[in-house]
Amino acid sequence: MDRKRMEALGKKRSVIRELFEYGNKRKAEIGAENVFDFSIGNPNVPTPKAVSAELSRLVSEGDPVAVHGYTSAPGSAAARSAVANDLNRRFGTSFGPEHLYLTCGAAASLTISLSALVEDGDEVIIFAPYFPEYKVFIETAGGKPVAVPCRETDFQIDFDRLESALNEKTAAVIINSPNNPSGAILSEESILRLSEVLSEAERRFGKRIFLVSDEPYREIVYSGEKVPFVTKYYRDTVVCYSYSKSLSLPGERIGYILVSPEIDGWEDIYAAVCGAGRALGYVCAPAIFQHMLPACAGLTPDLSLYSENRDLLYGALTEMGFSAVHPDGAFYLFVKSPDESAAAFSERAKKYELLLVPSDDFGVPGYIRISYCVSAEQIRRSLPAFKKLAEEYFK
Ligand code: PLP
C-alpha cells in the first residue's frame, strides 16, 4: 500500500463527506432545523417494521454465539440461501448460496470484487456521472479508472465513447442503475447493446471483460420502471448489492456479491472473491444483519415517500427556473447549475443554509446533486431558501 496516498485520502474527504461534516457543524451552531442538509444519502424512510421486529427478536431470544458469533466467511448458509431464493423468486433466476458472498454493504462489495477481478495496470471503465468513491476503490485494487461520459440528454450510455475507451487493458466496466447522482435507469435497450459491445470486445481482445453491476438502488424506482437484471443479459457479470438503501440501514453495513453462475469457471472467480475478502480483512458481514435476512430479504420500506419527495422538489425547482434531470429511480435530483461553476453555486447556496453537492467529483461539471431522502417537511421548509437562491440567477 502507498502510505502517502492513504495519508492524502485521509486528509481530503470526499466532497459529499466534506459537506456532510460542514452540515453537522452548522447544525450544532444554529440548530438542526435551520440547516437544509441535502448532502448525503442517509434514507429517512424508516426501516420496515418486520426488520426492526426481527432484530429485536434475535437480540432478546437468540443464543449469543448463534446471534453474535462469527459466521462462515462468505456468510451464513441460511442467509445466503434466503438471498438466492429472493432473487430467484423476483427474477426467475436459479442462483444458490454458493454464488453469494455477504459483505459490509456496497462499498465492501465493490472493493472486494475489484480486488478479485483487477490486476495491476488494468483499466476499469466507469460511466460519468459516477459515484466518486469508484476511483478510490479501483486505484486501491491496482487498476486505472477510465471515465466515459454518458449522453447528457438522457444519461444513457454513449456507445461511441464506450467503444473508443475499450482496449486490451480493460478488465471491467462498472454500471450503476438506478444511478447516483442522476436518478437515471439504464434501459433494457442500453443493457442489451452493452452486452453486445462487451461480448464483441471480449472476442476482439481475446479476454474476459467483467461487468460489475453496482445496484444499491435497485428497488427504489418510480412509475413502474424496470431495472433489467444484468446476469440475464451478459455472461461475465458480478452484482454488487447493498441493503443500505433498500432497507434504510446504511450505518449497519450489509450487502452481497453475486458471482453469476454463467461465468465460465465461476467457481474460480468466487474463490477470488473469498480470497479478496480475506486479504482485505473482512472476517464476515455483521452477524445479526445476516440472521435478519431469512425473514426480511426482499422487503422494502414505504417507497412512495421518495416518489412524493421527488415530485415536490422537481416541481418546485423547475417552477423557480432551475432545470433538472427527471429521476426515474434512486433518491437524487441532479440539477443544472445556473452558475458556470457548480462549486461556486454550492458555496452560494450555503448562504441560505442549503447543502447541495457540486458535481465535479461525479465526473461531470456544471450540476449539483440534491439528496431527497429527507422528510417532506424539510423539503417544504427549504423552498423559500431555494427561491431566494433562484432569484440571484433568474431575475
Ligand atoms: N454505490 C453507490 C452508487 C452509492 O450511492 C453508494 C452509497 O451511497 C455506495 C455504492 C455505497 O453503499 P454502501 O453504503 O452500501 O456501502
Image (cartoon, grey):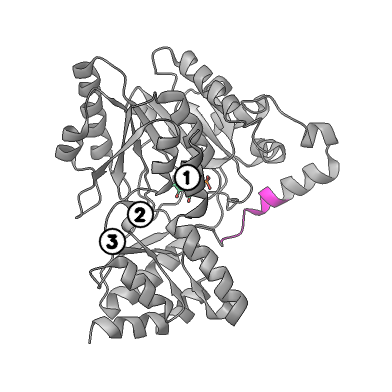
Q: Label 1: which residue?
A: 216
Considering only vertical position in the picture, is 41 above or below 315?
above
Q: Residue furthest top?
A: 265
Q: Residue at x 57, y 69 (%)?
A: 24
The amino acid on which the numbered mark 1 sits, given as a three-letter code, is Pro
Q: Residue at x 30, y 61 (%)?
A: 326
Q: Label 2: which residue?
A: 361
> Is residue 48 within the magenta segment?
yes
Distance of mark 1 from mark 3, alpha carbons?
A: 20 Å
Distance of mark 3 from mark 2, alpha carbons?
A: 18 Å
Nearer the viewer's eye, disc 1 or disc 2? Answer: 2
Nearer the viewer's eye, disc 3 or disc 2? Answer: 2
Q: Residue at x 48, y 48 (%)?
A: 9
Q: Where does the image place residue 26, in percent across and percent down from the top left?
A: 55, 75
Say if residue 212 shows up in the picture.
yes
Q: Label 3: which residue?
A: 325
Pointer 2 local density, CA inside 10 Å: few below 14, some 14–19, many at least 20: some
The answer to the question of whether label 3 and label 2 lie on touching residues, with beta carbons closer than 8 A, is no
Q: Is mark 3 within 8 Å of ligand 1?
A: no
Quick one: SS at disc 1? Answer: loop
Q: Is mark 1 within 8 Å of ligand 1?
A: yes
**Front-most of 58 and 288?**
288
Q: Where does the image place residue 38, in percent across and percent down from the top left?
A: 46, 67
Q: Where does the image place residue 253, in percent across and percent down from the top left?
A: 61, 44
**Quarter of the figure with the C terminus:** bottom left
Considering only vertical position in the picture, is 75 above or below 266?
below
Pointer 1 local density, CA inside 10 Å: few below 14, some 14–19, many at least 20: many
In the image, 325: left or right of 48?
Answer: left
Q: Which residues are magenta?
A: 45-52
The amino acid on which the numbered mark 2 sits, given as a three-letter code, is Asp
Considering only vertical position in the picture, is 250 above or below 164?
below
